[in-house]
Amino acid sequence: MSKSLIERTQYAGADLSLSEICELLSITSDIDLDLLWQAADHVRRQEVGEDIWLRGLLEFSNICTCNCLYCGLRRDNTGLPRYRLTEEQILEAVHRLSRLGIGTVVLQSGEDPYFTEERLIALLHAIRNTCDIAITLSIGYRPKSELAAFKRAGAHRFLIRHEIANPDLYRVFHPDSTLADRVEQLKDLRALGYEVGSGCLVGLPGQTVADLADDIALARELEVDMFGVGPFIPHPDTPLGEATPGSTLMTYKMIAVARLVLRDVHIPVTTALSTLEEDGREKGWMRGANIVMPNATPAPYRAQYELYKNKRCIDDTLEHCRGCLGRRVKSVGRVIGQGRGTSLKLLRREVLV
Ligand code: SAM
Ligand code: SF4
């Protein structure tokens, strides 16, 4: 049954029903898994080609007013040293990315009230005036008026995962927001002309395969430009510290099935996946992914952006990461994309209007 279903996905994956998505995510035999990886790799090649795009991740503040149960940055984690980069430090890191030919910076932080609309607009202007780089914001919830102002000030993309598409479980893990809030923000971002990234965690306690199928279906409904899937890794100083980590196999299946369903979307291999498996990046790229996010956060702050313990590559410089990723990309027969790596979905949308 799975074999014929997998074959069908290569041509008509976008139309899979929820039960078919569940069936693919439930595959366990080595033979069927190999077929799934091959189908995802085929569709990846056909839809987004051989490029692997680098998105430089700059974690500019680890201060957060939220209390998500799984995250080491949650406000109740009082043992974590907190930091906030200055505008000069941020600009220096962005310029370093640009000098290395990395076409995107992802400005990521906790929900830090210090970074008001005015301060972020000033920062966006400073980057746009000194550097030719695509700017992604990943700063959590913001009202629509601010999202519009950031777009006008030069932000190109926004990344905010819906995290888990089951509204009841969303409520359990996120005391400060609802799934409906996140979905509304994703819709607002799309309406404002952003390239929009969403995604989910794999392996949160109580999450089922049907929930994961809903995660992919929600991303399809929202027509996201980027879909990031990472395994949940328990942080000992959070309420989920004793929980079991998310499965890497299920994460690969999510990447592969997301590629079959979402077609020309950008799919990253996440740091969380490569933290749990040394060769997680290579496997992810061979199973549907086409993005990686080298870490551009300067020492000593990188180690303090502690979503979970033992994050990979926290002692490496950006230059070292760039070299290492170049070798890894080559080892899977692919090439590093040159330029910004704009969403193919967005380019197609623009052709249609
Ligand atoms: N505060 C912003 C937000 O929540 O969208 C951006 C920063 S947040 C740290 C980025 C992502 O980290 C979240 O979307 C979440 O999925 C992921 N994350 C947080 N804690 C994690 C954990 N323990 N294991 C794996 N991923 C985690
Ligand atoms: Fe804050 Fe984001 Fe972590 Fe939630 S996931 S506690 S919003 S940094």
Image (cartoon, grey):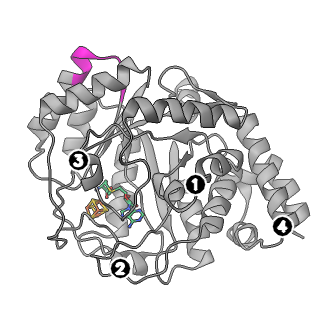
Disc nearer the start of the sequence (2/1): 2
Residue 191 horizontal side relative to residue 287, left or right: left
Q: Amino acid at mark 4?
A: Asp
* CA gap, disc 2 and disc 1: 22 Å
Residue 68 location (% of width, % of height): 29, 70
Q: Is residue 79 left or right of residue 231?
A: left
Q: Nearer the viewer, residue 258 or 251?
A: 251
Residue sitting nearer the eye, 267 or 310: 310
| Residue type marked 1 | Glu
| Magenta highlight range | 127-134
The residue tagged 3 is 301
Q: Residues within 10 Å of mark 4 (few under 14, many from 20)?
A: few
Location of mark 1 (residue): 278
Vertical relation: 315 (above or below) 121: below
| Mark 1 → mark 4, Cα distance in angstroms | 21 Å
Q: Which residue is mark 2?
A: 241
Q: Which mark is residue 30?
A: 4
